[in-house]
């Protein structure tokens, strides 16, 4: 393939990441509308319940990523990516029509099932096309769909949801999934898995301490970001004093931080994977504490939200690359576990934020809970560095 063909193929795959980013994050900015529609009132109890719209999608990813990745271990990757996108689109149509809170939770769970397996398949396709020297940057382009969604798609869909109804988010995402299917069909090459790849071989490759330490690190490290972002619309209006109409702009600022952090993470990871992780984790812990302390000052709240988004997103390419490195005999599963871990962190972060809010500690408390999680992640990173050096591999 020429460099142009490779670029077009990777960009086509990233559009799927864009659709996933919209559904994963736009619901956070639309929670007040969703809670008001599904429960009829907004209070601290229904706020915490509304967080389950985030949690159940994340749980779907946690369950679906390893299961569907295993099923795709021996399959041609382009066709499998298209299959996963089809499931994703159908689940969002069901979400659009879900009439009750319980049905909505079920639809959100189903929507999350293909998420991790799609990203695992797309990341492996991109890495193989780009070659060893540029694999982290290629993976960062695929993952950039999530970051760019937070910069453009999430604010736009949040505005659409505020103006025309929050459920239209699901229709937009379904349309984006169909568009991705068409782009992948046209631009992505057929790509067979490595010779000898099998479900049994992938399972055997999981007997690896470094892989599981990496998974735990990803869960803990990412959870801090979600502890505050799951409740960002409430923090922006009730703590910082912004009007509801400013929420899409605040989401856009967070998304711009994610775009910057994603590419910084890809660039840094091609030099030092775990060095990038430890830098990002330290910054997240610091910025979380400052956010919790200074969120009532509007310009500082916005600046710190940008910095949290950028530092947390540096973890994306670095953790994806690290997990693939720890399990060379189980690449499909290892790549999918990044997204299981990311969304377990999503669920954990939303629950942590909900717990401290429901306990009466206020809307600043999720930031301090997130800082605690990032500090723990920093300690786990140091242990991962020790294991990597003991294995004689590059940190």
Image (cartoon, rainbow, N blue to C red):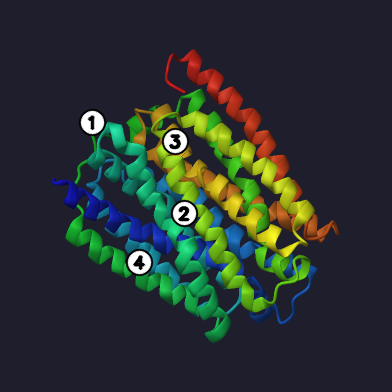
Please report whichever mark, 3 or 1, sits nearer to the chain's N-terminal start.
1
Please report whichever mark, 2 or 1, sits nearer to the chain's N-terminal start.
1
Q: Which of 75 and 17 is in front in this view?
A: 17
Badge 2 is on which residue? 259
Q: How far apart are marks 3 and 1 (CA)?
A: 32 Å
Q: Position of residue 394 (x, y in %)?
A: 42, 21
Q: Which mark is residue 196?
A: 1
Label 1's element? loop
Q: Position of residue 346 (x, y in %)?
A: 59, 52
Please report whichever mark, 3 or 4, sits nearer to the chain's N-terminal start.
4
Q: Distance between the residues labelled 2 and 3?
A: 14 Å
Q: How far apart are marks 2 and 1 (CA)?
A: 37 Å
Position of residue 142 in the picture relative to residue 156 (left or right): left
Tell me the quarter of the picture where residue 379 sits.
top right
Label 2's element? helix
Q: Residue 268 carries which label?
A: 3
Q: Mark 2 vs mark 1: give the one in front.
A: 2
Q: Residue 177 carries which label?
A: 4
Tell me the residue at 32%/37% (across/down). Answer: 135
Tell me the residue at 32%/44% (across/down). Answer: 138
């Amino acid at each position: 393939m020429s460099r142009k063909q490779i670029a077009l193929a990777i960009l086509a795959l990233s559009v799927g990441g864009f659709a996933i980013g919209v559904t994963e994050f736009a619901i956070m900015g639309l929670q007040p509308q969703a809670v008001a529609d599904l429960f009829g009132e907004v209070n601290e109890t229904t706020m915490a319940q509304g967080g389950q719209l985030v949690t159940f999608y994340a749980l779907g990813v946690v369950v679906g990523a390893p299961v569907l990745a295993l099923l795709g271990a021996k399959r041609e990757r382009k066709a499998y990516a298209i299959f996963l996108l089809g499931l994703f689109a159908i689940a969002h149509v069901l979400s659009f029509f879900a009439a009750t809170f319980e049905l909505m939770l079920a639809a959100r769970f189903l929507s999350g099932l293909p998420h991790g397996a799609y990203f695992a398949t797309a990341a492996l396709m991109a890495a193989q096309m780009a070659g060893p020297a540029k694999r982290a940057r290629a993976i960062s382009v695929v993952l950039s769909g999530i970051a760019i969604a937070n910069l453009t798609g999430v604010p736009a869909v949040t505005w659409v949801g505020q103006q025309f109804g929050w459920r239209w988010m699901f229709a937009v995402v379904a349309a984006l999934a169909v568009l991705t299917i068409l782009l992948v069909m046209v631009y992505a090459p057929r790509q067979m898995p490595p010779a000898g790849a099998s479900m049994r071989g992938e399972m055997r490759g999981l007997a690896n301490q470094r892989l599981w330490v990496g998974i735990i690190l990803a869960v803990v490290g990412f959870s801090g970001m979600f502890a505050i972002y799951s409740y960002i619309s409430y923090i922006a209006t009730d703590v910082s004093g912004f009007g509801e109409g400013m929420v899409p702009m605040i989401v856009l600022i967070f998304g711009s931080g994610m775009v910057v952090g994603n590419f910084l993470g890809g660039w840094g990871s091609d030099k030092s994977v775990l060095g990038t992780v430890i830098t990002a984790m330290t910054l997240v812990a610091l910025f979380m504490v400052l956010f919790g302390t200074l969120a009532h000052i509007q310009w500082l709240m916005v600046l710190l939200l940008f910095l949290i988004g950028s530092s947390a997103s540096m973890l994306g390419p670095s953790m994806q690359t690290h997990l693939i490195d720890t399990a060379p005999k189980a690449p499909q599963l290892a790549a999918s576990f990044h997204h299981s871990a990311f969304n377990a962190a999503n669920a954990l972060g939303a629950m942590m934020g909900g717990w401290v809010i429901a306990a009466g500690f206020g809307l600043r408390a999720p930031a301090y809970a997130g800082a605690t999680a990032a500090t723990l992640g920093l300690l786990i990173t140091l242990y991962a560095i020790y294991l990597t050096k003991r294995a004689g591999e590059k940190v």
